[in-house]
Image: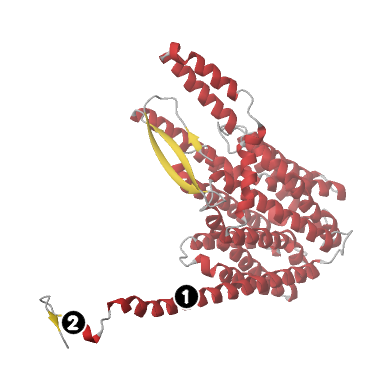
Amino acid sequence: MVEVITCNERTEDVKEDMRTDGNGHTVENVIHETKEDPESQTQKTRAWIGSVVYLCFYGFMVQLKPGEPFITPYLLSAEKNFTREQVTNEINPVLTYSYMTVLVPVFLLTDYLRYKPVLILQSLSHVSIWLLLFLANSLLEMQFMEFFYGITMAARVAYSSYIFSLVPATVYQRVASYSRSSVLMGVFTSSVLGQICVSLGDVSYRTLSAVSLGFVTFGFLLSFCLPWPKRSLFFNQARLEEERKEAAQSELARMKPEENDGSVVAQDSNHKSPSWTNSVFVQMLKELKHVVKVPSLRLWSLWWVFNSTGYYLVLFYVHILWNKVYPATDNKHVYNGAVEAASTLLGAITSFAAGHVKIRWNLWSELVIGLITAAQAGLLLLMGITDNIWVCYVAYALFKGFYQFLVPIAIFQIASSLTKELCALVFGVNTFLGTVLKTIITIIVADKRGLALNVQSQFFVYFFYFTLLTVIYLGCSAFIITCHYRNQRAQEETMEVAIPTELNPMTTDASEGTIAHNGTSIKT
């Protein structure tokens, strides 16, 4: 597959960038860089810098929901008066079901509609969440609130990929770090603000919901001012390519109308009705079968599916666990916001540290994943058995930090050997499979139609889940490391045997004598 980015100007320099697809084949990305005057280049640079700054500001603002860490205490408080069983077994599971239901449509619509409409939908869902929390009180209305929460989670893909459609490929890594940092700073600021309001300002949960509603409404208004990208990854490629070809043909027609008349018509007839089977998206789906053949892609994709499932199940239910361990009657002593702020900061630090770890990932990946998963399993067991809320807080922050440490490594390991389009599709498929697994576990463990376990029992289930993953990872690591050193030893033995064999032809018979330095034969 060839990605071609063309320009309408006549003078162009062509650069080639070589990457591999899921089949291990080399893919050529041909990028036409236009020689433009400095003023035009400056204007274009200012345009995308302005777009990036605005998008980062938008990403920061939509995360300002100071009431978010306190949703579960709010539902369990006298203001809403839901029981812990209702929140655990009837309200929270709707989030998982909603996320799975809307994930694929949102993923496809994000690319087809070119990001902005999906971000508007996400902001509208945020408004719906806090409007329901502020005004509604029935069980059904809270289930609708979780449904809208699932939409906002599924729409995160629009923000994370939107920024790449605004900037040139040379600054992808830099702007990705900007957008992620703005989101993390928004979450951190929101959590700190919420904790200050509750602990120092003695603000009620309902008032905090009203403040959150004001922030997300402002974010909804900001979403209408976002720039509209002109390109996307999958669905609009054929249309854009057709526009480029038509522009090039009209250019040729103006230059040599008598020579190109027939050829333009012939080419136009060939491209009027492109088959959907030749689209970039369908070709990417065909390439997915080759991804599982690459060991590193297979390993980190499986990690993404299985470990992210456990991670999000813990995130969805940990606030209920905190209320079980320490059912505070005074809002001032509920420190959910402070813990979320600290865990977000720790996650940012571990994500940054992961970028500086230099080891042989093809040999040690399974061992690193196994050890970190074992640590997470131990933290889950600690959260399930402790009666000390501070121990529970610290264990949760460490659990979250360990996961955030492996996320950038997984992204690099998957993205470094794939084209941009196939990389996006692999992450989308991994996320969907993880969501399906999360839904199955939720139906069995948490839903009232399943086992309907209480929250502490659920954390024991998650402990056994991570323990099983640990055994599998460490077992695979032992096998791979053993095979590696066994092969290395065999190669060394082969080299030792090969050395005298190679020197054998150089040995001479004693009767033939030896050759002196001056070339004369010396008989012995």
Q: Position of residue 117 (x, y in %)?
A: 66, 34
Q: Amino acid at mark 2?
A: Thr
362 and 343: which is toward the camera: 362
Residue 341 placement (x, y as % from top left): 60, 59
Q: Residue at x 18, y 82 (%)?
A: 514
Q: Residue at x 85, y 59 (%)?
A: 447
- Locate the C terminus and report the quarter of the image it occupies: bottom left
Q: Is residue 197 visible?
A: yes
Question: Which of the numbered marks, if any, corresponds to residue 131?
Answer: none
User: Is 97 on the left or on the right of 52, as rendered?
Assistant: right
| Res 379 visible | no
Q: Residue furthest front?
A: 511
Residue beneath disc 1: 488
| Quadrant that contains the N terminus | top right
106 vs 261: above or below:
below
Residue 464 at x, y percent in the picture:
74, 72
Q: Earlier in the sequence, mark 2 or mark 1?
A: 1
Residue at disc 1, secondary structure: helix
The answer to whether residue 374 is left or right of residue 262 is right
Depth check, front residue: 269 or 127: 269
Q: Nearer the viewer, residue 126 or 215?
A: 126
Counting other residues with Cα less than 10 Å from the Cα at mark 1, is it few (<14), some (14-19), or many (20 or more)? few
- Disc 2 designates what residue? 514
Name which residue type carries label 1: Gln
Q: Image quarter for residue 39?
A: top left
- Spatial separation of the CA atoms under disc 2 and disc 1: 39 Å
- From the viewer's side, name the closer residue of 207 and 424: 424
Residue 322 is left or right of residue 416, and the answer is: right
Q: Residues within 10 Å of mark 2 (few under 14, many from 20)?
A: some
Q: Residue at x 70, y 75 (%)?
A: 382
